[in-house]
Image (cartoon, grey):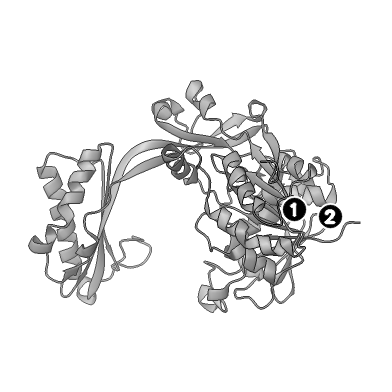
Amino acid sequence: MPKLLRIGNASGFWGDRIGAAARLLAQQPNLNYITMDYLAEVSMSILAKQRDKNPSLGYATDFLEELRSLIPFWEKGAHCKVIVNAGGLNPLGCAQAAADILRGSKCSSMKIGVVSGDDVLTMLEADGDFPNLDTGESIQGVRESLVSANAYLGAKPIFEALNKGADIVITGRVADPSLVVACCVAHYNWGWDEYDRLAGATIAGHLIECGAQVTGGISTNWLEVPDPANIGFPVVEMSADGSFVITKPEDTGGIVSEETVKEQLLYELGDPDNYLSPDVNVSFLSLQLQEEGRNRVKVSGAKGSPPPSTYKVSATYRNGYMAEGILTLFGHHVRKKASRCGEIVLQRVRNAGFELNKTQIECIGSGDVVPETIPATPDWDLRECVLRICVADPRKEAVECFSKELVPLVTSGAQGTTGYFGGRPRVRQVFGYWPCLLDSHRVQPKVEIIEATLS
């Protein structure tokens, strides 16, 4: 029987704490794998812009810094493997950059697995309706504006890379839990039809994919979370039967409790009896949670069935431009002053001949951010608020007009206003999100192995 499998996660998104992987391995040296998740829904559009400027990019460059931080551990004999989706739109480019880093160390013999084939942009550009999963609309209306389209691959190509001896696996778009599922299948030699076990691994991956969220981050009782500045990243202790324990390294901040685990179980969850992934269809309904000690929660009872015959596709498209301006106001009647300042700016844009497609005026601090959720604060009770004016329009020149009208309030706006030092609001391109489905047989994952000594 293989030894207990330990998997840690050191990144919940592109922008998470730099150096987390090295800290996690130093705190928990017995890890078999470290996973890192870099790709949110909008990430591919950001990477597409990056790649347009430099064709050698298109991946999450933060990963390379994490990789450098792990080299000293490997040089001293650590056997922890790394699986990341940092490849984005260019997994091979990311792997080649990683190989360049390893080549200058004592780790040059390490193998890097590259998983690609998730890019299905040409298929969506060619033909087909590809209905939006949220609205049912045909993709026809945005087809010419598409920027990226990536299928969520499953664990099988990651497992193939591990089976070929990869020490590091770099993927493009894959289902977040599949990073963990691949580790489990490789370690315990599960079959792809052992659906209850795959379901357990999928839930484990779901729980740790967002890093410190399951160890107390953004939890209901966050104010009671101990030492949040040193919050520990999560560790899964995976058993051969598909049950597992969620924990974190000793002497780190944060908390793992039944409450934090339940909250993360519900994160991005639709039908708890029909959680779809490329590896297995999961039911959460029979799950059992049990606290086994301080910062240790056992999860068991997952049920699985065959996966769907389709892959979810995350596509993005160009959707106009936006800008936002922020000012701080204080003094008497501050909410009325803020609202009037916002209306002045929008009126001046209308006077210039632009009827903006979308506008929003918010007096932050008065209840505008969460309208009807909490009672609005009476104007007489406010002494300061933050004015946020946000606009969006298909025409760049219309948004640029708005950008030029905010700062003139310095002389024509309300007294007690500050925040002009930031200058004119920056005009940014907007990307829309288009989720749809694609028959899985149309997607052909590709697995390559790169050796730093040979690349």
- For the point 18% across and 56% down, which residue is it? 342
- Position of residue 294 measured from the top left corner of the image (x, y, whole percent): 71, 77
User: Would residue 270 be found to the left or right of residue 344 on screen?
Assistant: right
- For the point 12% across and 63% down, which residue is it? 410
Q: Earlier in the sequence, mark 2 or mark 1?
A: 1
Residue 424 numbered tag: none
User: Would residue 234 be found to the left or right of residue 31 on screen?
Assistant: left
Which residue is tagged 2? 241
Looking at the rendered image, the quarter that the N terminus falls into is bottom right
Which residue is tagged 1? 200
**Which of 166 and 219 lies nearest the eye of the viewer?**
166
Element carrying mark 1: helix
- Position of residue 59 measured from the top left corner of the image (x, y, whole percent): 53, 45
> Within 10 angstroms of label 2, few (less than 14), some, or many (20 or more) residues?
some
User: Would residue 58 be found to the left or right of residue 387 on screen?
Assistant: right
Q: Amino acid at mark 1?
A: Gly
Instruction: Tell whether label 1 touches label 2 (CB within 8 Å).
Output: yes
| Separation of residues labelled 2 and 1 (CA atoms) | 8 Å
- Position of residue 180 measured from the top left corner of the image (x, y, whole percent): 70, 52
Q: Amino acid at mark 2?
A: Asp
- Position of residue 111 measured from the top left corner of the image (x, y, whole percent): 73, 46
